[in-house]
Amino acid sequence: MVKRQLLYKEWKQSELTFILVMLVATLATPFLFLMEYSSFETCLKDTTCIVDSPRFSYIFKTDAFLSLSWLMGLFFAVIQLGVERNKGQMDFTLSLPFSRSTIYHTKFFLGTGIIVVVHAVSYVLTYLLILGLNPLETPGLHSGYFVSLVSSLMFYSLFFAAGTLTGSSISQAIVGFSTAILPFLVFGLPMVHLEFILKTSGSWVDKSFTYLISPMSPITYITTDPFQSDYPLWFTGEEFIIPIVMMVLFYLIGLLSFMKHPIERNGRFFLYRTIDRPIQILVIVFGVLGFGWVGFSSDNSMFGYIAGMVIGGVVGALTSYFLIYRKR
């Protein structure tokens, strides 16, 4: 499924970028840990500085790298597919004596492998620092790294699948982010409008967002603490299991898309002509619902509601036309 020659080609194609990102991402958390420890030690020596405890502690739930590591998955996916199409190199890759499934799996293996290695090496370095410096407590170390890894892999799989459907890096990013918030658009906007029409208290909408929409939205999992301590979970381990399931789903969608689309349409928004019109209709509908909600919220009148829907329809139609039907 993964060919060594093709893997070497994929690595050499963006070697410098991969190495730089790996170095920065691997050393980010250990470096931040050391900086915090150094600042704490300096504060202990300063009589005007006040500390909560005489021993150092580090909260990994607030670590910048762990909170933003999902960007690494997005970046690798765009580099491997969107940027390659922008440069016109995808046609060459597909002309090599390898099947489409082999090319897909090799690219996917390289991206996921780098993400796993980065998190593993960063974790080992951080753990060695903890053993050496012996801080008082390090809450969220294990769960923080694991959630960060799973979220990064899920977003990589999501944007990789988006790249198999689209013809440029910009369209890949737009489709990826749109999918990340899709449950809010598909379920959330109609619920809000029903609340307007039925004039209810809105509590059922809040509960629906909390119990249903948030857990199934990829955007929810981009931090090391996707749910607060009082968040009503569906089941134990939800913050780990759901993104893993979504990762597998996006992987399968990307595989089928990469194997089945007939020709490359570099520069086009979608590689499949057949989905241009349905997506345009969806964008218009979301524009109508979204701007209608904003219009009603602004003055709580039917005039604002209708005016917002009209404006949303126009904006959605123009936006979808220029994005989908104009070649880049």
Image (cartoon, helix red, strand yellow):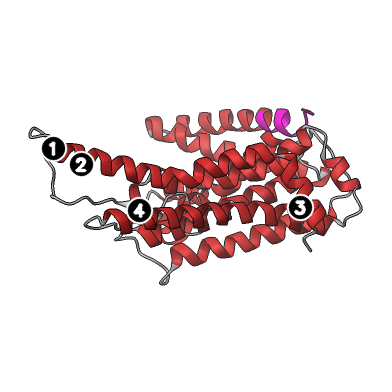
Q: Is residue 229 left or right of residue 152?
A: left
Q: Which residue is mark 1?
A: 45
Name the residue type under label 2. Glu
| Residue ID at (44%, 57%) | 124
Pinpoint residue 249: horizontal percent, then vertical percent.
64, 62
Q: CA distance from mark 3 to mark 1?
A: 52 Å
Magenta-drawn stretch contains 321: yes
Q: CA distance from mark 4 to mark 3?
A: 34 Å
Q: Which disc, if any, is residue 41?
A: 2
Q: Which residue is mark 4?
A: 129
Is residue 301 something one can see in this rendering?
yes
Magenta-drawn stretch contains 303: no
Q: CA distance from mark 1 to mark 4?
A: 21 Å
Are circles 1 and 4 on residues that touch, CB within 8 Å? Answer: no
Are circles 4 and 2 on residues that touch, CB within 8 Å? Answer: no
Name the residue type under label 3. Leu
